């Protein structure tokens, strides 16, 4: 789809980044990695753009913030989308490697990129790649939290190395910058330039950063349904 027919908005909530991608002609859109405190903002942006949000997609089970997916689902009937390995009981559409989620003329291609978590995905929409916490600008997501695996993270990053340099990288956090390209990351990201799998795994398993402040409440929220609401079907697309 043509770039000029895309509505795109990056929404910042402290260090977390979420995104709205919409279709100007078809008046529909998706929200990626929505954060609970920004629920009103997503709905307001959808009103502003005069689009209907069809899907709320989490790139993975977040351990540092509460997802807005189940609130958006409950309040606005927006379908929650996550990888099949997700434990979230409210997922309507469970996706896997190679699946394409269609929303009007927007095609969201799913790459399964485990490592940060087992259910981690990257999403390709046109010339953008939403990398969740698989690839960050100048870094990558940690691998020591539940479901993390440094070896798988290495393999997933190697997969991204094979994709086109032109892809604009939009991560779930911006500890440094808010956007980059895959070409720039291949040249300068130390995690992508690790000389060997062994060195990468060694680095990731020895760094031991402190746990996210809200890990307990975030994981509890992100893995449970809203009381009194239906569980998602979780079936594939
Ligand atoms: Fe994460």
Image (cartoon, grey):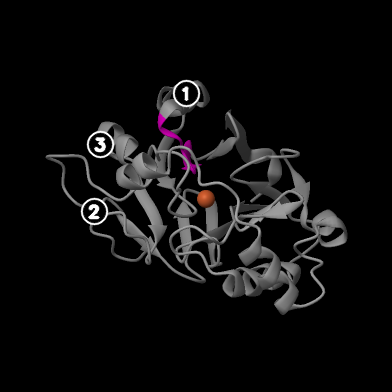
Say if the magenta span includes residue 145.
no
The local secondary structure at tag 1 comes to helix
Residue 118 in percent (x, y) is at 46, 66
Mark 2 / mark 1, whichever is N-terminal? 1
Quadrant into which the C terminus falls = bottom left
Mark 1 is surrounded, within 10 Å at the Cα level, by few (under 14), some (14 to 19) or many (20 or more) other residues, namely: some
Q: CA distance from mark 3 to mark 1?
A: 16 Å
Residue 45 in percent (x, y) is at 50, 25
Please give left or right for residue 154 compared with residue 71 in the image: right
Q: Which residue is mark 2?
A: 232
Q: CA distance from mark 2 to mark 3?
A: 11 Å
User: What residue span does the magenta drawing correspond to?
Assistant: 27-36
Q: Which residue is mark 1?
A: 41
Q: Residue at x 58, y 45 (%)?
A: 172
Quadrant in the picture for residue 164? bottom right
The local secondary structure at tag 2 comes to loop
Q: Which residue is mark 3?
A: 74
Q: CA distance from mark 2 to mark 1?
A: 24 Å
Taking depth in this image into account, of 8 and 177 the one nearest to the observer is 177
Residue 31 in percent (x, y) is at 48, 40
Residue 140 in percent (x, y) is at 67, 56
Above or below for 71 versus 97: above
């Amino acid at each position: 789809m043509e770039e000029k027919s895309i509505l795109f908005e990056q929404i910042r909530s402290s260090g977390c980044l979420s995104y709205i991608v919409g279709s100007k002609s078809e008046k529909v859109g998706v929200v990626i990695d929505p954060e609970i405190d920004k629920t009103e903002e997503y709905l307001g942006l959808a009103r502003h753009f005069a689009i209907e949000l069809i899907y709320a997609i989490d790139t993975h089970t977040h351990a540092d913030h509460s997802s807005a997916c189940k609130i958006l689902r409950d309040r606005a009937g927006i379908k929650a989308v996550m990888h099949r390995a997700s434990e979230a009981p409210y997922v309507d559409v469970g996706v896997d490697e190679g699946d394409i989620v269609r929303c009007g003329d927007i095609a969201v291609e799913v790459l399964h990129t485990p490592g940060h978590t087992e259910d981690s995905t990257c999403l390709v929409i046109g010339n953008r790649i939403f990398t969740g916490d698989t690839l960050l600008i100048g870094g990558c997501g940690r691998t020591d939290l539940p479901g993390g695996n440094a070896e798988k993270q290495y393999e997933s990053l190697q997969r991204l190395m094979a994709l086109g340099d032109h892809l604009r990288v939009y991560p779930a956090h911006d500890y440094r910058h808010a956007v980059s390209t895959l070409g720039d990351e291949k040249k300068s990201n130390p995690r992508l330039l690790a000389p060997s799998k062994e060195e990468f795994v060694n680095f990731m398993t020895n760094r031991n950063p402190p746990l996210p402040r809200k890990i307990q409440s975030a994981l509890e929220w992100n893995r449970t349904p809203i009381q009194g609401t239906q569980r998602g079907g979780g079936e594939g697309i």
